[in-house]
Amino acid sequence: MAQSSIEWTEMTWNPTTGCTKISAGCKFCYAEVMTKRLQAMGLEKYADGFAVRTHPDALSLPYSWKKPKVVFVNSMSDLFHPEVPLAFIQQVFEVMNNNPQHIFQVLTKRAELLYQYSNKLRWTDNIWMGVSVENEKVMDRIDFLKGTGAKIKFLSCEPLIGPLPNLDLTGLQWVIVGGESGQGNIRSMKEEWVIDIKNHCQQQDVAFFFKQWGGKNKKAAGRELQGEIFSQMPILM
């Protein structure tokens, strides 16, 4: 586990590590960059670099947390990557089921596999399930998410690299929006894209969280949208 600087969570828990690129949002994957640093530091967990690996020894960690936590699951991976066995995903879910005092935020780009596995998983109220939607090309992920048994469903539109027209948020409770950040050829996010998503959230009574404008200096760019900070979240359990 690790304390997190991600604005919408408190800490991270990584029972799996590693991933492969699947869509345009993966181009400047922060987890891949961080993995290289951790591997260079000699951390055994990252000895195989960004190859997909499961870590059964990490499954016991949530049982040791004394106070309720808001936890981002697999910040360094994708739990629904096809190389992660269903049996291991079920073990991760069992840990989350057994620790209702914590909120577990799970995020995937593999929405089709998420949907396929959904009825083989136990969806307790403390599991928030999200999909990444970075542009119009991957909006089909939303429908797969809606078909799951998760009680709290959310979108992570980060990095937002294109508009999301006619956004139907029926059955969803939360939307996170953020621009791309890093030192590469960062793709800019247009204000009108963000405002359109915010308006859809407000019209459809969905919590809206604006995480960042991004860029090469994301702290300087800040989090203000039209002079306001939006940090709404679903009702906490």
Image (spheres, rainbow, N blue to C red):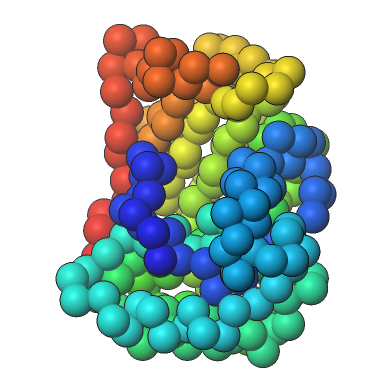
Q: Is residue 90 above or below residue 84?
A: below
- In this view of the protein, which residue sits in the foreground, 224 or 184? 184
Q: Residue at x 74, y 48 (%)?
A: 140
Q: Quadrant of the N terminus?
A: bottom left
Please state which of residues 93 and 17 is positioned toward the viewer in this rendering.
17
The x, y position of residue 84, in whole percent, is 72, 76
**Residue displayed at 40% across by 20% down:** 219
Q: Is residue 207 above or below residue 236?
A: above
Residue most extreme to the left = 67
In the figure, 216 relative to 40: above or below? Answer: above
- Specify whether 147 is left or right of 200: right
Counting from the top left corner in percent of width and height, residue 117 is at 69, 78
- Name the image quarter holding residue 86: bottom right
Q: Position of residue 77 (x, y in %)?
A: 64, 60
- Residue 116, compared with residue 209, is above or below; it is below
Q: Residue at x 80, y 43 (%)?
A: 23
Q: x and y percent of residue 148 in the render?
A: 59, 69
Q: Residue at x 58, y 54 (%)?
A: 41
Q: Is residue 41 visible?
A: yes
